[in-house]
Image (tube, coloured by chain):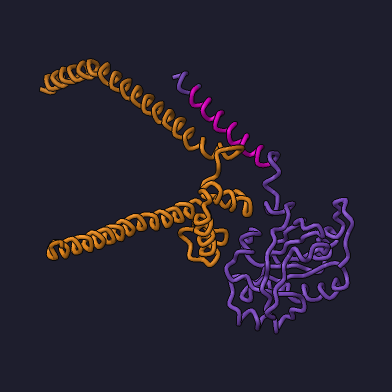
Amino acid sequence: MGNPGVKTDLKMLKKRVVYITALASFILGVLTLKPLADSIDDKVREISYLLMCPVCQGQTVAESNSELATQMRTIVRKKLEEGKSKEEIIAYFVARYGETILGAPPARGANWLLWALPALALVFGGAGVALFLRKSKSEKSKEENRKISHEPQVQAESKYLEKLNQELKKFES
Amino acid sequence: MKIISVLTKLSILVALLLLLGLLGYAVFGNKVFIKSSPVVGREASDFTLELFNGERIRLSDLRGKVVLLNFWASWCIPCRDEAPVLESSWRKYRNMPVAFIGVNVWDDKDSALVYLGQFGGGYDNGVDPKGEIAIEYGVGGVPETFFIDQYGKIVDKYTGPLTEEIIEYFLGKALSQQNGQPRSEN
């Protein structure tokens, strides 16, 4: 014969363990599901920002509210849910709309110039500005040198004028 | 002083050469850029279209026929311009191994039905509510028309309103396609 009080306690403890386990599983499930949902949304947004809307002017698929852009976002989501990678989804759209669908042109062929030209412009522009500044600085210093070399002459001239004035005053008196 | 001017001249020369190179590549370079659509020359993706009369057609069931696949919308003015031309051309080719299919996109069903009542619609017309067929074919506006040969290959794509001459030219081209396979007459 066992103690009925201990049995009841054990039963209650078991119940509590089951409840706690169920609650913990639920919380864990919610916590793990939420980031997954977020990550698909983020991926849809990320890919949609890389694609230009074919019927809009200068808007990406992510930014446009056109029906085509909305349908394209749905296809992006569907493909992500099917387990397709970002590269595969982008390749799918490029295979149908061409490279003009891409927000940024791939750096190959003539396109590399589009990537290289800003850097080249920066280098050459920077060099040009540096040369201009160097040139103007050297001209300024030359000007200053010229001014300094003129000063004794000006002093001499003022002394001469002073003497001339004195002579004229003498002559008048 | 002399070094400065030489460097300036050199940078201008390099910039000019780069621009000339870019221009040359654009003019004489990769001719792939002038291709109308990347889907041209590929096998046409199969699809099932729900017609306005409730029936369904499958593109692959039309193998052996040249298919004129036209994407349209009731609000599209150039589509209205080409609609009578499409109808008359369909009548002209209906006894030949040619099928005309109209796909209504980015539209509402009622307006599309009014449009069809107004402009004919003797050939099969259906709706692509999710735009899946349109996106599969890389459609970026309406009207756009694809010409598919009897072997299921996309021969051409035409963007803009069709004329009888344009239809004749592209259908003639699609009909003359030979893949070394016997042409089946349906």
Snapshot quadrant of residue B75: bottom right
Q: Is residue B86 left or right of residue B71?
A: right
Snapshot quadrant of residue B186: bottom right
Hue used for the chain lettered B? purple
**Magenta segment main secondary structure:** helix
Q: Is residue A60 above or below residue B90?
A: above
Q: Is residue B73 above or below residue A34?
A: below
In front of the other: A172 or B79: B79
Q: Which chain is orange?
A: A
In front of the other: A87 or B146: A87
Q: Is residue B186 left or right of residue A35?
A: right
Q: Does the magenta run of residues contain B21?
A: yes
Q: Is residue B6 above or below residue B104?
A: above
In front of the other: A47 or B80: A47
Regarding residue B78, the answer to whether it shows in the image is no
Magenta-tinted stretch: B7-27
Q: Quadrant of the C terminus of chain A?
A: top left
Q: Is residue A40 above or below residue A141?
A: below
Q: Residue A23: x and y, percent?
A: 26, 61
Q: Is residue A69 left or right of residue A17?
A: right
Regarding residue A24, the answer to whether it shows in the image is yes
Q: Residue A26: x and y, percent?
A: 31, 61
